[in-house]
Image (cartoon, rainbow, N blue to C red):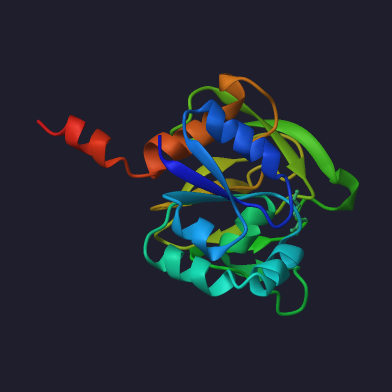
Amino acid sequence: GPRIGVLALQGDVPEHVAALAGVGARPLVVRREAELDACDALVLPGGESTTMVRLLRIFDLLGPLRARIAGGLPVLGTCAGMILLADRVLDGERGQETVGGLDVTVRRNAFGRQVDSFEGSVTMAGVPGRLPAVFIRAPWVEEAGPGVDVLARVDAGPGVGRIVAVRQGPLLATSFHPEVGEGPDAWRVHRYFAEQVVPDPAGARRRDP
Ligand code: GLN
């Protein structure tokens, strides 16, 4: 399987490592540039987006990560990771900086104080069946640019109709936490990422006539 890193400066790292191993990828924790260089793809986990940006800067990873993304690195951003990928943030800290690359505007803590955390379910294009979707002080995508595919919207309850999963080429982002839960069924988003988003040269050759 591909070498898929998990940015491990802060946030829910072990759950992503388990999910990636569970779908046959080779997970790698990333704290240094050499580890980033070794990755075929990367997960930006949930956590606290402002803290993660500060730590990216302190660990001298912000520039290298932006360069890899500009070079086409496949990235899965979940929750705070979605915020990190977004080009624009609403309700963030004043002038909140992101890594960027994904042509969307996200709203932080979008579901409001009364619905701090909740579990819903979503259907996501490209992913079979209904997905349990855990939202924890989650963002949603307020606006998506023309090159962005909307993969999922909230289909009931708070924030109904809001965009909670998007893809723009190699960049995939979800508002919810696809790493929670156990077993192959719980990790359908990681499987989609590893199989559909991360290029597999051997697989591409196999599909050739
Ligand atoms: N509210 C957090 C932020 O703004 C994201 C929450 C999460 O990742 N669970 O970064």
Residue furthest out toward the front = 34
* Whole-percent x, y for residue 173 in the image: 55, 49
In this orientation, which residue lies closer to the viewer: 167 or 194?
A: 194
Q: Can residue 99 be seen in this view?
A: yes
* Whole-percent x, y for residue 204 in the image: 23, 38
- Picture quarter with the C terminus: top left
Relative to 110, residue 154 above or below: above
- Picture quarter with the N terminus: top left
Which quadrant holds residue 176? top right
Which residue corresponds to the image point at 65% horizontal and 69% vertical from the top-left?
A: 59
Which residue corresponds to the image point at 70% horizontal and 54% vertical from the top-left?
A: 139
Which residue corresponds to the image point at 62% horizontal and 58% vertical from the top-left?
A: 31
- Left or right of 114? Residue 187 is left
Q: How many marks?
A: 0
Residue furthest out toward the left = 209
In this orientation, which residue lies closer to the viewer: 104 or 193?
A: 193
In this orientation, which residue lies closer to the viewer: 158 or 70?
A: 70
- Left or right of 35? Residue 182 is right
Which residue corresponds to the image point at 74% horizontal and 41% vertical from the top-left?
A: 135
Q: Can residue 123 be seen in this view?
A: no
* Whole-percent x, y for residue 95 in the image: 71, 79
Residue furthest out toward the bottom = 95
Q: In which quarter of the image is ligand 1?
A: bottom right
Relative to 167, residue 179 above or below: above
* Whole-percent x, y for residue 76 in the image: 53, 48
